[in-house]
Image: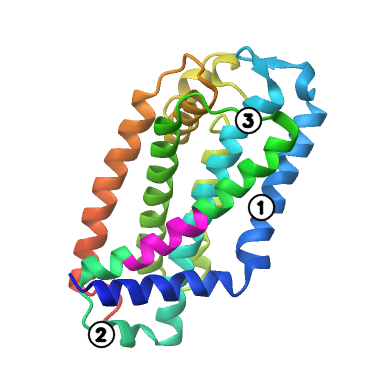
Amino acid sequence: MNLIGVKTLLGKEVRRFLKVPGQTVFSPLISTSLYFLVFGFTLGGSQVQTDGVPYLVFIVPGLVFLGTANNAFLNSSSSLFITKIQGTVVDLLVAPLGPAELMIGFVTGAMVRGLIVGLATWAVTLYFTGFHLVHPLETFAFLLLSAYVFSMLGLLAGLWADKFEQINFFPTFVMLPLTFLGGVFYSVDRLAEPFRTISLFNPVVHMVVGLRAGMLGLPLPRTAGMTILLLLAFSATALAYRLLKSGYKLKA
């Protein structure tokens, strides 16, 4: 393991998004905070109860997940894609960095951005809802795994994409529908059949429910969300390692 190389690549990835904080941190933070203000207050705020807690409190875990997952994905996918488009991927290929070092550098940098946005979103909501963290270890395990999984999925998207249209395909046509239909702003249990049963096939539902159970202490099933995250983590890691090792769409 080339620790100096990993540290250098990680430092480059973090500096890359910190150079434009308005675009990479504050813009998604403001967007997510607006979701909280608009959906929270227009749908009743603290006067409406959902699963036994005020609606404003109920949507916080979903918004934290949304900020973490989206920004982790966007960072790793855009970073690798830009190195391909600009031709600077050659610098990575000739450097003494193996597939494991490349994965760690890109994915960890993306996780840092995702967690910064997710935790900053949480900090903003504290002003309106107060502090709620019933199971700290479980909550941060969900956050770390979510950031890792979506960073790894972003890396796969960056490897696969050849055009800007392709790099936007996954967040627009996959992540956006899954997250908005994933119980971020509502309780799946309140849906009528067959929509409730159909929603259970959405993996984001189980991730949001698990994080909500950890933060708010609600008696909700956690196992499904953690299992899905672990399966995605192992499978995405194995696939990304294999593609990087083979030089898929990196070597001419």
Q: Residue at x 34, y 39 (%)?
A: 229
Q: Tag 2: residue type?
A: Ala
User: What's the colour scheme?
Assistant: rainbow
Q: Tag 3: residue type?
A: Phe
In this figure, which residue is indicated by the disc labeled 1?
29
Q: Tag 1: residue type?
A: Leu
Magenta residues span 105-114
Work out how far the residue at label 1 is from the one at label 2, CA to CA, in angstroms: 35 Å
Q: Residue at x 21, y 82 (%)?
A: 96
> Between disc 1 and disc 2, whose residue precedes?
1
| x, y percent for residue 91 | 32, 87
Work out how far the residue at label 1 is from the one at label 3, CA to CA, in angstroms: 19 Å
Horizontal arrangement in the rendering, residue 247 relative to residue 8 (left or right): left
Is disc 2 placed on a helix, strand or loop? loop
Mark 1 or mark 3, whichever is nearer to me: 3
Residues at badges 1 and 3 in contact (C-beta under 8 Å)? no
Residues at badges 1 and 2 in contact (C-beta under 8 Å)? no
Which quarter of the image is occupied by the C terminus?
bottom left
In this figure, which residue is indicated by the disc labeled 3?
131
Res. 201 image quadrant: top left
**Pick the front one: 226 or 214:** 214
Q: Residue at x 30, y 72 (%)?
A: 6
> Between disc 2 and disc 3, whose residue precedes?
2
